[in-house]
Amino acid sequence: MTQKKQHLLFSLLLLITSIVTTTVYYQQYPGVTLNADSATYLIVVAKMAAQHLSLLSLVDAVRLPGYPLFLFAGSNLLVATFVQIAMFVLVALLTYWIAFLAFETSWIALVCGLLVATNPTQLGFFKQIM
C-alpha cells in the first residue's frame, strides 16, 4: 500500500471513529451541558446583546470577548455545542497529522489520533459551554 493511500485510509478511519464516538456520546448525554463558568459567559453574551455589540460591551473584567462572541454569533447554545463537537473531530484529525509530521510513521500517528478521538472525558469538555 502506498503512503498516500495509507494516509487516506487512516484519516478516513479516524474520521469515522471520531464521528461514531461523538454520536454515541451525544446519545448518552443529549442537550447542552453547562458548568460553573457558563454563567459568566452567558452574562457577557447578554451584555453584548443588550448593548448591540458596542465596543463597551466587549470589555469585561472577568472574560475575554473571544468565546462570548462565538456564543453570540451562534445565538443558540445547541448550535454552539455542535460547532464545538465539529472542532473536536477536527482536533482528532489534526492530532493525526501533527503526529505524522513528528514521527513520520502512519500507524503511530493513527494511534495518537485514536487516543484523542475516543477520549470521552475530552469530548465532555468540548461539549460544555465554558
Image (tube, grey):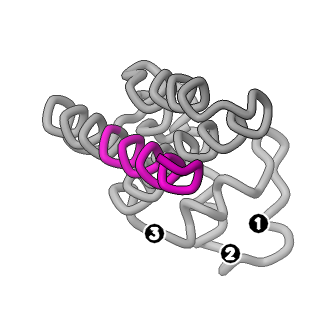
Residue under label 3: 75
> Residue 45 in magenta?
no
| Quadrant where the C terminus is found in the figure | top right
Mark 3–mark 2 distance (CA, rounded to whole Å)? 15 Å
By secondary structure, the bulk of the magenta-drawn segment is best described as helix
x, y percent for residue 81: 40, 51
Q: Residue at x 37, y 62 (%)?
A: 79
Q: Amino acid at mark 1?
A: Ser
Q: Residues within 10 Å of mark 1 (few under 14, many from 20)?
A: some
x, y percent for residue 30: 19, 40
Of marks 1 and 2, which one's residue comes earlier in the chain? 2
Tags 3 and 2 in contact by the CB under 8 Å rule?
no
Of marks 3 and 1, which one's residue comes earlier in the chain? 1
Identify the mark at residue 57; answer none if there is no mark: 1
Instruction: Please name whichever residue, 49 or 123, is drawn nearer the observer in this view of the structure.
Output: 123
Q: Residue at x 33, y 56 (%)?
A: 78
Observer able to see residue 35 = no
> Residue 3 in magenta?
yes
Location of residue 97 (image quadrant)? top right
Q: Which residues fall within the magenta stretch?
A: 1-17
